[in-house]
């Protein structure tokens, strides 16, 4: 899969699993995304897709690299629909 396609799929999964924040943007915790069976089947490298989406300013989150367990409570915010 190409990166743009995976980023588009990531946006859809964040909308599916996330909740609207006070500013109307959708938010989801990394642990929710990482442990979701559907996401595990879609993304071979979820962390890589998250980093690519962050570089394109489609999502934002604290830090650079997210690791399962350690960063499960890090909030990922969808900036673009």
Image: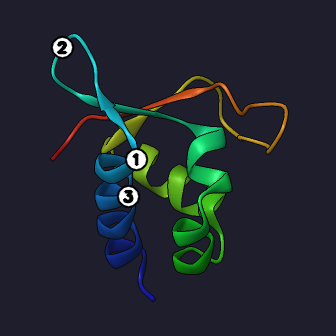
Q: Quadrant of residue 66?
A: top right
Q: CA distance from mark 2 to mark 3?
A: 19 Å
- What residue lies at 31% left-to-right and 55% top-to-bottom? 11
Residue beneath label 3, please?
A: 13
Q: Residue furthest top?
A: 22
Residue beneath label 2, please?
A: 23
Badge 2 or badge 1: first in the primary sequence: 1
Q: Position of residue 35 (x, y in %)?
A: 67, 54
- What residue lies at 65% left-to-right and 53% top-to-bottom? 34
Q: Quadrant of residue 24?
A: top left
Is 29 rendered above or below residue 39?
A: above
Q: Position of residue 78 (x, y in %)?
A: 31, 38
Which quarter of the figure is the N terminus placed in? bottom left
State the residue in front, 70 or 64.
70
Is 77 rendered above or below residue 6?
A: above
Label 2 Cα crowd, 10 Å radius (few <14 / some 14-19 / many 20+)? few
* Picture disc at residue 17: 1
Label 1 Cα crowd, 10 Å radius (few <14 / some 14-19 / many 20+)? some
Q: CA distance from mark 2 to mark 1?
A: 17 Å
Answer with left or right where residue 27 lies relative to residue 66.
Answer: left
Q: Are marks 1 and 3 in contact (CB under 8 Å)?
A: yes
């Amino acid at each position: 899969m190409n990166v743009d396609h995976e980023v588009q799929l990531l946006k859809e999964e964040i909308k599916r699993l996330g909740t609207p924040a006070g500013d109307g943007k959708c938010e989801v915790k990394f642990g929710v995304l990482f442990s979701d069976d559907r996401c595990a089947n879609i993304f071979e490298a979820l962390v890589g897709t998250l980093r690519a989406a962050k570089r394109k300013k489609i999502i934002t989150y604290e830090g650079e690299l997210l690791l399962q367990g350690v960063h499960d409570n890090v909030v990922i915010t969808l900036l673009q629909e």
